[in-house]
Image: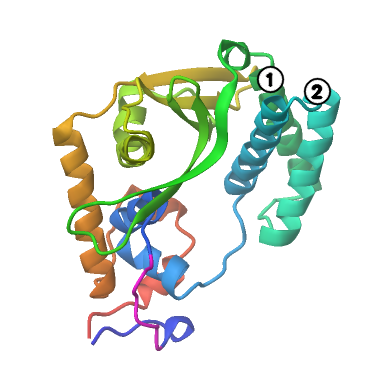
Amino acid sequence: MKKFPSEASSPPAVRPDYLSPSSVKSYLLCSLRFFFERVAQIRKPTTVALHIGKTIHATLQSFNLARWRGENSSETAMEEAFSTHFLELEKTEGPVDYADEKTRQKVRSCAWNTVKAYMASDEVTSQMPLGVEVGLSATIPGLPVPVRGVIDLVQHDLTAVDYKSAAAKQDTGHAAFEHELQLVTYQMMIEEATGDTPPSLDLSYLVKTKTPQVIRVKIPPADDQRKQRVADLYRIAYEDITTEHFHPQPGMQCSWCQYRKECSGWCSK
Protein backbone atom coordinates (compact mmCIF):
# COMPACT_ATOMS: atom_id res chain seq x y z
CA MET A 1 0.00 0.00 0.00
CA LYS A 2 1.42 3.39 -0.96
CA LYS A 3 2.22 5.89 1.79
CA PHE A 4 1.94 9.62 1.32
CA PRO A 5 2.89 12.65 3.41
CA SER A 6 0.65 13.47 6.36
CA GLU A 7 -1.21 16.21 4.44
CA ALA A 8 -2.44 13.55 2.01
CA SER A 9 -3.15 10.67 4.42
CA SER A 10 -6.13 8.35 3.91
CA PRO A 11 -7.00 9.46 0.37
CA PRO A 12 -10.51 8.67 -0.84
CA ALA A 13 -11.11 6.08 -3.53
CA VAL A 14 -10.60 7.68 -6.91
CA ARG A 15 -13.66 7.06 -9.10
CA PRO A 16 -14.15 10.07 -11.37
CA ASP A 17 -17.61 10.61 -12.83
CA TYR A 18 -16.01 11.92 -16.02
CA LEU A 19 -12.65 12.79 -17.52
CA SER A 20 -11.55 16.01 -19.18
CA PRO A 21 -8.61 16.84 -21.46
CA SER A 22 -7.01 18.92 -18.70
CA SER A 23 -7.31 16.22 -16.03
CA VAL A 24 -5.86 13.51 -18.27
CA LYS A 25 -3.04 15.74 -19.47
CA SER A 26 -2.25 16.58 -15.84
CA TYR A 27 -2.17 12.89 -14.93
CA LEU A 28 0.06 11.95 -17.84
CA LEU A 29 2.49 14.79 -17.07
CA CYS A 30 2.98 13.62 -13.48
CA SER A 31 0.63 11.22 -11.74
CA LEU A 32 1.86 12.17 -8.25
CA ARG A 33 1.29 15.87 -8.83
CA PHE A 34 -2.19 14.93 -10.07
CA PHE A 35 -2.76 13.14 -6.77
CA PHE A 36 -1.61 16.04 -4.61
CA GLU A 37 -3.55 18.62 -6.59
CA ARG A 38 -6.77 16.85 -7.57
CA VAL A 39 -7.23 13.96 -5.15
CA ALA A 40 -5.69 15.15 -1.87
CA GLN A 41 -6.53 18.75 -2.91
CA ILE A 42 -3.51 20.32 -1.23
CA ARG A 43 -3.87 24.06 -1.83
CA LYS A 44 -0.90 26.14 -2.94
CA PRO A 45 -0.60 29.88 -3.67
CA THR A 46 -1.79 30.69 -7.18
CA THR A 47 1.10 31.39 -9.54
CA VAL A 48 1.22 34.74 -11.29
CA ALA A 49 1.11 33.10 -14.72
CA LEU A 50 -1.99 31.06 -13.82
CA HIS A 51 -3.80 34.06 -12.37
CA ILE A 52 -3.05 36.23 -15.40
CA GLY A 53 -3.98 33.44 -17.79
CA LYS A 54 -7.35 32.98 -16.08
CA THR A 55 -7.99 36.73 -16.04
CA ILE A 56 -7.26 37.03 -19.77
CA HIS A 57 -9.42 33.99 -20.50
CA ALA A 58 -12.36 35.34 -18.45
CA THR A 59 -12.13 38.74 -20.15
CA LEU A 60 -12.12 37.19 -23.62
CA GLN A 61 -15.17 35.19 -22.60
CA SER A 62 -16.92 38.42 -21.57
CA PHE A 63 -15.87 40.08 -24.83
CA ASN A 64 -17.08 37.26 -27.07
CA LEU A 65 -20.33 36.85 -25.16
CA ALA A 66 -21.02 40.58 -25.55
CA ARG A 67 -20.36 40.35 -29.30
CA TRP A 68 -22.50 37.22 -29.60
CA ARG A 69 -25.42 38.84 -27.74
CA GLY A 70 -25.09 42.22 -29.45
CA GLU A 71 -24.18 43.91 -26.16
CA ASN A 72 -21.53 46.51 -25.30
CA SER A 73 -18.11 45.12 -26.26
CA SER A 74 -16.24 48.44 -26.30
CA GLU A 75 -12.75 48.85 -24.89
CA THR A 76 -14.15 50.79 -21.93
CA ALA A 77 -16.64 48.05 -21.08
CA MET A 78 -14.00 45.35 -21.43
CA GLU A 79 -11.49 47.22 -19.28
CA GLU A 80 -14.12 47.26 -16.55
CA ALA A 81 -14.74 43.54 -17.07
CA PHE A 82 -11.00 42.88 -16.95
CA SER A 83 -10.64 44.73 -13.64
CA THR A 84 -13.58 42.82 -12.17
CA HIS A 85 -12.17 39.43 -13.22
CA PHE A 86 -8.68 40.35 -12.00
CA LEU A 87 -9.92 41.23 -8.50
CA GLU A 88 -12.47 38.42 -8.20
CA LEU A 89 -9.94 35.76 -9.16
CA GLU A 90 -7.50 37.12 -6.59
CA LYS A 91 -10.18 36.67 -3.94
CA THR A 92 -11.57 33.30 -5.00
CA GLU A 93 -8.38 31.54 -6.08
CA GLY A 94 -5.70 33.48 -4.24
CA PRO A 95 -3.47 34.26 -2.63
CA VAL A 96 -1.49 35.04 -5.77
CA ASP A 97 2.25 34.60 -5.45
CA TYR A 98 3.29 38.17 -6.33
CA ALA A 99 6.75 39.35 -5.28
CA ASP A 100 5.38 42.80 -4.39
CA GLU A 101 2.73 45.36 -5.38
CA LYS A 102 4.94 46.80 -8.12
CA THR A 103 5.10 43.39 -9.79
CA ARG A 104 1.34 43.01 -9.43
CA GLN A 105 0.68 46.30 -11.22
CA LYS A 106 3.22 45.52 -13.94
CA VAL A 107 1.74 42.13 -14.85
CA ARG A 108 -1.78 43.55 -14.62
CA SER A 109 -0.90 46.25 -17.17
CA CYS A 110 0.77 43.69 -19.45
CA ALA A 111 -2.28 41.42 -19.31
CA TRP A 112 -4.68 44.23 -20.19
CA ASN A 113 -2.50 45.33 -23.10
CA THR A 114 -2.60 41.75 -24.36
CA VAL A 115 -6.40 41.71 -24.22
CA LYS A 116 -6.52 45.02 -26.11
CA ALA A 117 -4.25 43.57 -28.79
CA TYR A 118 -6.69 40.70 -29.26
CA MET A 119 -9.70 43.01 -29.52
CA ALA A 120 -7.90 45.03 -32.23
CA SER A 121 -6.71 41.98 -34.17
CA ASP A 122 -7.99 40.19 -37.26
CA GLU A 123 -9.21 37.42 -34.92
CA VAL A 124 -12.22 39.57 -34.08
CA THR A 125 -13.13 40.67 -37.60
CA SER A 126 -12.80 37.19 -39.18
CA GLN A 127 -16.03 35.60 -37.90
CA MET A 128 -18.73 36.13 -35.33
CA PRO A 129 -18.80 33.24 -32.86
CA LEU A 130 -21.37 30.47 -33.18
CA GLY A 131 -20.84 29.58 -29.52
CA VAL A 132 -18.81 30.83 -26.56
CA GLU A 133 -17.63 28.54 -23.74
CA VAL A 134 -19.39 25.59 -25.34
CA GLY A 135 -19.69 22.63 -22.98
CA LEU A 136 -19.81 19.28 -24.77
CA SER A 137 -19.13 15.62 -24.09
CA ALA A 138 -17.93 12.61 -26.03
CA THR A 139 -18.34 8.86 -25.59
CA ILE A 140 -15.23 6.74 -26.00
CA PRO A 141 -15.72 2.96 -26.49
CA GLY A 142 -14.31 1.02 -23.56
CA LEU A 143 -14.27 4.07 -21.28
CA PRO A 144 -16.90 3.75 -18.51
CA VAL A 145 -17.30 7.52 -18.04
CA PRO A 146 -17.88 10.35 -20.52
CA VAL A 147 -15.24 12.86 -21.57
CA ARG A 148 -16.31 16.44 -21.00
CA GLY A 149 -14.80 19.75 -21.99
CA VAL A 150 -15.53 23.41 -22.62
CA ILE A 151 -14.46 24.91 -25.95
CA ASP A 152 -13.49 28.57 -25.69
CA LEU A 153 -14.97 29.53 -29.05
CA VAL A 154 -16.76 27.71 -31.87
CA GLN A 155 -16.95 29.54 -35.18
CA HIS A 156 -19.86 29.25 -37.61
CA ASP A 157 -17.97 26.73 -39.75
CA LEU A 158 -17.49 24.61 -36.55
CA THR A 159 -13.80 25.47 -36.18
CA ALA A 160 -12.87 24.98 -32.53
CA VAL A 161 -10.69 27.75 -31.09
CA ASP A 162 -8.81 27.50 -27.80
CA TYR A 163 -7.09 30.51 -26.24
CA LYS A 164 -3.60 30.24 -24.82
CA SER A 165 -1.59 32.99 -23.14
CA ALA A 166 2.19 32.77 -23.44
CA ALA A 167 5.23 34.79 -22.48
CA ALA A 168 6.97 34.20 -25.81
CA LYS A 169 6.14 33.24 -29.38
CA GLN A 170 5.46 29.51 -29.69
CA ASP A 171 6.83 27.00 -32.18
CA THR A 172 3.77 25.98 -34.17
CA GLY A 173 4.77 22.33 -34.54
CA HIS A 174 5.42 21.96 -30.82
CA ALA A 175 2.17 23.77 -29.96
CA ALA A 176 0.17 21.38 -32.14
CA PHE A 177 1.82 18.32 -30.56
CA GLU A 178 1.54 19.63 -26.97
CA HIS A 179 -2.19 20.30 -27.25
CA GLU A 180 -3.13 17.33 -29.44
CA LEU A 181 -5.12 15.61 -26.68
CA GLN A 182 -7.26 18.68 -26.05
CA LEU A 183 -7.86 19.62 -29.67
CA VAL A 184 -8.69 16.13 -30.90
CA THR A 185 -11.07 15.75 -27.96
CA TYR A 186 -12.85 18.92 -29.10
CA GLN A 187 -13.15 17.46 -32.59
CA MET A 188 -14.67 14.25 -31.19
CA MET A 189 -17.14 16.29 -29.13
CA ILE A 190 -18.22 18.42 -32.09
CA GLU A 191 -18.60 15.34 -34.29
CA GLU A 192 -20.75 13.61 -31.67
CA ALA A 193 -22.91 16.72 -31.18
CA THR A 194 -23.37 17.72 -34.83
CA GLY A 195 -22.39 14.77 -37.01
CA ASP A 196 -19.93 17.02 -38.85
CA THR A 197 -16.14 17.30 -38.69
CA PRO A 198 -14.71 20.76 -37.97
CA PRO A 199 -12.50 22.06 -40.81
CA SER A 200 -9.74 23.10 -38.41
CA LEU A 201 -8.63 22.82 -34.78
CA ASP A 202 -7.13 26.17 -33.84
CA LEU A 203 -5.01 27.65 -31.08
CA SER A 204 -5.16 31.41 -30.63
CA TYR A 205 -2.01 32.49 -28.80
CA LEU A 206 -1.98 35.79 -26.92
CA VAL A 207 1.72 36.48 -26.53
CA LYS A 208 2.52 38.80 -23.62
CA THR A 209 5.59 40.45 -25.14
CA LYS A 210 6.42 44.17 -24.91
CA THR A 211 4.31 44.62 -28.01
CA PRO A 212 1.61 41.95 -27.55
CA GLN A 213 0.96 39.59 -30.44
CA VAL A 214 -2.01 37.44 -31.40
CA ILE A 215 -1.01 34.34 -33.37
CA ARG A 216 -3.43 31.76 -34.78
CA VAL A 217 -2.08 28.22 -35.13
CA LYS A 218 -4.28 26.16 -37.47
CA ILE A 219 -4.20 22.39 -37.12
CA PRO A 220 -5.96 20.00 -39.52
CA PRO A 221 -8.70 17.77 -38.13
CA ALA A 222 -7.62 14.38 -36.84
CA ASP A 223 -7.81 11.19 -38.85
CA ASP A 224 -8.84 7.87 -37.32
CA GLN A 225 -5.31 7.08 -36.17
CA ARG A 226 -5.00 10.34 -34.20
CA LYS A 227 -8.43 9.85 -32.65
CA GLN A 228 -7.56 6.26 -31.70
CA ARG A 229 -4.37 7.46 -30.01
CA VAL A 230 -6.31 10.00 -27.93
CA ALA A 231 -8.97 7.42 -27.02
CA ASP A 232 -6.23 5.04 -25.84
CA LEU A 233 -4.76 7.76 -23.62
CA TYR A 234 -8.13 8.29 -21.94
CA ARG A 235 -8.57 4.57 -21.29
CA ILE A 236 -5.04 4.21 -19.90
CA ALA A 237 -5.42 7.27 -17.65
CA TYR A 238 -8.79 6.11 -16.30
CA GLU A 239 -7.48 2.64 -15.45
CA ASP A 240 -4.39 4.01 -13.71
CA ILE A 241 -6.29 6.70 -11.78
CA THR A 242 -8.94 4.30 -10.52
CA THR A 243 -6.29 1.75 -9.46
CA GLU A 244 -4.40 4.57 -7.70
CA HIS A 245 -1.19 4.43 -9.70
CA PHE A 246 0.40 7.65 -8.42
CA HIS A 247 4.17 7.98 -8.47
CA PRO A 248 6.87 10.61 -9.16
CA GLN A 249 7.72 11.31 -12.80
CA PRO A 250 10.86 13.49 -12.65
CA GLY A 251 11.44 15.89 -15.51
CA MET A 252 11.89 19.52 -16.41
CA GLN A 253 8.43 20.25 -14.96
CA CYS A 254 9.88 19.63 -11.48
CA SER A 255 11.68 22.99 -11.64
CA TRP A 256 8.38 24.89 -11.36
CA CYS A 257 6.27 22.32 -9.48
CA GLN A 258 4.81 23.55 -6.19
CA TYR A 259 4.64 20.04 -4.71
CA ARG A 260 8.37 19.35 -4.39
CA LYS A 261 8.15 19.04 -0.59
CA GLU A 262 5.26 16.58 -0.70
CA CYS A 263 6.93 14.65 -3.52
CA SER A 264 10.13 14.20 -1.52
CA GLY A 265 8.13 12.39 1.16
CA TRP A 266 6.71 9.80 -1.22
CA CYS A 267 7.62 6.10 -0.93
CA SER A 268 6.11 3.03 -2.55
CA LYS A 269 5.55 1.05 0.66
Residue drawn where x is 65% and y is 32% of the image: 60
Q: Is residue 159 left or right of residue 112?
A: left
Residue drawn where x is 31% and y is 41% of the image: 181
Circle 1 sits in a helix, a strand or a loop, which is it?
helix
Residue linked to disc 1: 119
Asked whether 167 falls inside the magenta stretch, the response is no
Residue drawn where x is 31% and y is 39% of the image: 188
- Check the image and name the residue furthest to the front: 195
Quarter occupied by residue 14: bottom left
Give 104 or 205, whichever is nearer the viewer.
205
Residue linked to disc 2: 75
Q: Is residue 167 left or right of residue 194?
A: right
Label 1: how many Cα within 10 Å (few below 14, some 14–19, many 20+)? many
Name the main secondary structure of what is drawn in magenta. Answer: loop
Residue 246 appears in the figure: no
Colour basis = rainbow
Residue drawn where x is 36% and y is 29% of the image: 175
Residue type at the position of mark 2: Glu
Q: Are marks 1 and 2 in contact (CB under 8 Å)?
A: yes
Q: Residue 190: percent from the left, percent from the top?
A: 37, 36
Q: Residue 93: percent from the left, percent from the top?
A: 66, 59
Circle 2 sits in a helix, a strand or a loop, which is it?
helix
Q: Is residue 62 left or right of residue 155?
A: right
Asked whether 15 falls inside the magenta stretch, the response is yes
- Does 12 sit above or below residue 260? below
Q: Earlier in the sequence, mark 1 or mark 2?
A: 2
Figure disc tally: 2
Q: Residue 189: percent from the left, percent from the top?
A: 36, 41
Give 156 or 243, whichever is nearer the viewer.
156
Q: Residue 77: percent from the left, percent from the top?
A: 83, 29
Magenta residues, start to end: 10-17
Give 109 or 28, whichever is nearer the viewer.
28
